[in-house]
């Protein structure tokens, strides 16, 4: 059995050996460039473009500020259609831009924004759609783009879970007008904190870079009311090291997901997500749904059992964003309007998954879930 005193969290940052990080720090100390588009920053942008298969990427201090800036870059106003099933920062970014979020339900298979519900939510004030690739599972990008084209709407993808995800050999980051990434410590690829915006042309890249640096377009020229959202050199150095081992990390996550599926497949009332055909996944999370009637224990019961054994899963995403006091007064947030999201949020728990997670711990987690049956 796993050491009961050892805490196991839903995720754990992958860190390079300290002796590999020190030479980068020595270089930073030597050139005394800590931020403002330093050499490691430039190198990381170039290497990320190559690895991710995108044309342009702008690095940020974190993913939330990147999303706030993306909305500014596209001059989004009015109302934006989005999902209630995400981390709250998705909607906070709209609110900080004085944009009204309009929630629509999710589809039942992979919990992404349901395209069939979007058109009914469009009003004369709608300017964009903000879907989320939940757990790294791609949205129905073709259907969403068709709606956007019909109604002349912008599409910004919250792609914070999708590092390295491809669909039919096309990087998922190449869909939509912009895609926003997070490199937070909890993510598959981390720069301690960090984030990025992916765009498709040089003009937009320049606009984004200006916005994240106070709006400066030159030493004495300010072209927009920008903010300070730059990634520093220490973060960039971490990213460069992370890229050296990212493929191995994702492969380890894949093996963990496969082991979970094998061990949980025979347990009543437990549902997990299978890989999507023609999608290269990054296995950022491993969610399961617990049907209380079939399993015999509720999601919260399983959550507390695991927690009592020092295994800290997370109820991603619970409550729905639309259920938080900040947003529940919105018309689109009213109870009963999003039945699928409301059901999923009561049944979901994400189990621990990270490259260093031991097989013994995985087996212990599955055994504890089985005992609740």
Image: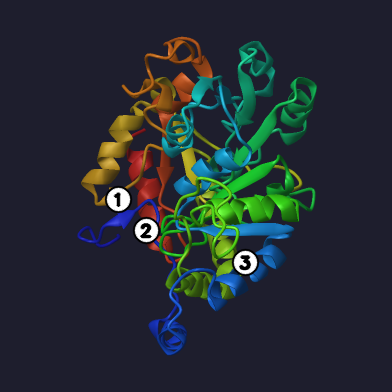
Q: Give the number of the disc on residue 275.
A: none
Name the residue beneath numbered marker 1: 311
Picture coordinates of residue 129, whole percent (x, y)? 63, 28
SS label for mark 1:
strand
Q: Is residue 155 left or right of residue 103?
A: right
State the residue position of label 2.
Answer: 361
Judged left or right of residue 182, residue 17 is left
Residue 223 in sight in this render: yes
**From mark 1 to mark 2, how far is it between C-alphas?**
9 Å
Identify the colour scheme used: rainbow
Closer to the camera: disc 1 or disc 2?
Answer: 1
Tell me if mark 3 has few (under 14), some (14-19) or many (20+) residues whose alpha carbon lies within 10 angstroms of its own: some
Dot 3 corresponds to which residue? 45
First of labels 1, 3 by sequence position: 3
Label 1 vs 2, first from the N-terminus: 1
**Residue 174 vertical placement versus 303 (above, below):** below
């Amino acid at each position: 059995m796993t050491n009961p005193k050892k805490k196991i969290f839903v995720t754990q940052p992958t860190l390079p050996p300290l002796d590999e990080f020190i030479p980068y720090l020595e270089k930073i100390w030597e050139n005394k460039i800590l931020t403002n588009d330093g050499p490691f920053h430039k190198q990381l942008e170039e290497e990320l473009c190559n690895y991710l298969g995108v044309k342009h990427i702008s690095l940020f201090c974190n993913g939330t500020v990147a999303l706030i800036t993306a909305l500014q870059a596209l001059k989004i106003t009015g109302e934006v259609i989005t999902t209630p099933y995400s981390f709250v920062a998705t909607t906070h970014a709209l609110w900080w831009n004085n944009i009204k979020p309009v929630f629509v339900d999710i589809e039942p298979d992979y919990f992404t924004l349901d395209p069939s519900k979007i058109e009914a939510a469009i009003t004369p004030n709608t300017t964009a759609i903000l879907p989320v690739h939940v757990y790294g599972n791609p949205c129905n990008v073709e259907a969403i783009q068709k709606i956007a084209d019909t109604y002349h709407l912008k599409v910004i993808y919250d792609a914070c879970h999708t590092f390295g995800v491809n669909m039919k050999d096309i990087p998922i980051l190449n869909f939509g007008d912009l895609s926003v990434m997070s490199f937070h410590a909890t993510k598959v690829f981390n720069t301690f904190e960090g984030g990025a915006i992916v765009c498709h042309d040089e003009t937009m890249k320049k606009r984004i870079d200006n916005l994240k640096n106070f709006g400066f377009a030159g030493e004495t020229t300010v072209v927009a009311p920008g903010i300070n959202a730059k990634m520093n050199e220490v973060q960039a150095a971490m990213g460069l090291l992370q890229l050296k081992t990212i493929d191995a990390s994702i492969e380890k996550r894949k093996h963990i997901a496969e082991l979970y599926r094998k061990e949980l497949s025979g347990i009543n009332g437990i549902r997990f997500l299978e890989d999507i055909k023609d999608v290269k996944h990054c296995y950022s999370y491993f969610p399961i749904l617990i049907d209380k009637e079939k399993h015999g224990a509720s999601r919260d019961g399983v959550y507390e059992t695991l927690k009592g054994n020092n295994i800290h899963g997370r109820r991603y995403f619970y409550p729905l964003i639309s259920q938080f006091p900040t947003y529940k007064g919105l018309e689109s947030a009213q109870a009963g309007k999003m039945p699928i999201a409301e059901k999923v949020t009561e049944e979901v728990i994400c189990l621990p998954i990270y490259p260093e997670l031991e097989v013994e711990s995985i087996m212990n987690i599955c055994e504890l879930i089985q005992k609740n049956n």
